[in-house]
Image (cartoon, coloured by chain):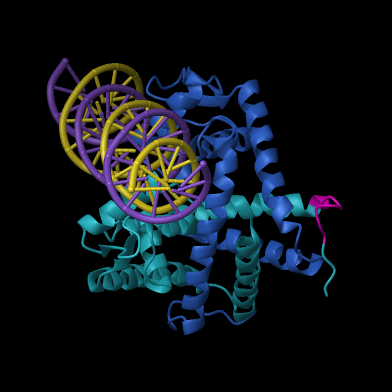
Chain colours: A cyan, B blue, C yellow, D purple
Amino acid sequence: MAKKITKQNPPPLEVFSVADRLHSTAIHLLRRVRKQDVASGEGPARFSALSVLVFGGAKTLGELAAAEQVKPPTMSRIVAGLARSKLVEITADPQDGRRMSIRPTPRGVKLLHEGRQRRIEYLASHLAELTAQELAQVAESTEILARVLRNWT
Amino acid sequence: MAKKITKQNPPPLEVFSVADRLHSTAIHLLRRVRKQDVASGEGPARFSALSVLVFGGAKTLGELAAAEQVKPPTMSRIVAGLARSKLVEITADPQDGRRMSIRPTPRGVKLLHEGRQRRIEYLASHLAELTAQELAQVAESTEILARVLRNWT
DNA sequence: GGAATATAGTTAGCTATGCTAACTAAATTC
DNA sequence: GAATTTAGTTAGCATAGCTAACTATATTCC
């Protein structure tokens, strides 16, 4: 197993510097890309929730809230907005009358893919200035961070 | 000079895949870290604007809005909030009565540094699970992306 | 079986952040 | 000195986050 730096040995200064720059870079990257999402008529929170449904299948409201790291009332409103735009449909759980099953409509799937396409094309057009090597580095680093996020408490 | 992929040759599929995962990872990373910022009593937009002032010195409202990529009315309200909390002070420009000069107060500088510390410690505590090699990879990739952002139109 | 408790979601109401449209006030141009 | 431009504000709308308090259904426990 690879050597791991754990919380028992406090992290070296280098980690703080990386954390700081990573944070600032992530903020400014998203601030730009977010505007593309808004062009679809749905805000980023709705978009992100819809993408969980499209790629992860039907979910209850609580599961969606947990996946998106927001509280149930917040997700309740996001889902209400998606339902109003007919991007998701909601059915009652026959086993448990308190639960709802939320699933994307064909319209929802279509809108997600279009928005995703628009956003990715925008980001990709800027990543296109990178060399193949740099792109590979960004790709690898993204996977590393995605793993950190999965282990996040 | 290294081979560059330019907009003249459309980007390969790989770029889209990286763009997509980068976007999703950035969203989820920030969603977690944002909660630490809120713990300081000021929201992320105020925090970010304050950091521009602390590291970049006094600015007019328009300059701040441009730096933060928001419209003037939005920045007007952010600055009003910072002023209400006595984190910035505002003086009129003696040369041009329409312009305002916004600068951080000592209290603002202190709060920024504390919040930054808290947020960075939080992020760093999770980056601490990485090996030195992985951390270096994330660091390098962050610099690459920061460069892309600087060149962004 | 029925009361107490736990769980899933909603409603109400607050704050913050984004926008556009329309305004005020100061500076500049003609 | 009138017209225009520029800097910032105000008003009003929508999204998105929260907590507190509510409803309705399930479960537990006597």
Q: Is residue A2 visible?
A: yes
Left or right of A87: which side holds A144? right
Residue at 26% in and 53% down: A81
Image quadrant in which the N terminus of chain A is located: bottom right
Examine the rendered structure and indicate whether residue B79 appears above or below residue C17: above
Measuring from the top left, give residue B78's x and y in whole percent. 44, 31
Q: Report whether residue B12 is seen.
A: no
Q: Residue at x 61, y 26 (%)?
A: B108
Please say whether residue B132 is one of the residues in the magenta stretch. no
Residue B137 pos. (x, y %): 71, 68
Quadrant containing the C terminus of chain A in the rendered view: bottom right
**Closest to the observer, B52 or B119:** B119
User: Is B115 situated above or below B136?
Assistant: above
Q: How many marks?
A: 0
Q: Is residue A115 above or below residue C4?
A: below
Please say if A108 is above or below A31: below
The residue depicted at 56 percent of the width and 79 percent of the height is B4
A42 or B87: nearer the eye? A42
Residue A140 rendering spot, x and y as whole percentages = 64, 74
Which residues fall within the magenta stretch? A5-13
Q: Position of residue B37 (x, y in %)?
A: 58, 39
Main secondary structure found in the magenta portion: loop
In the displayed structure, does residue A3 sit left or right of residue A108? Answer: right
Q: Is residue A12 magenta?
A: yes
Picture quadrant of residue B117? top right
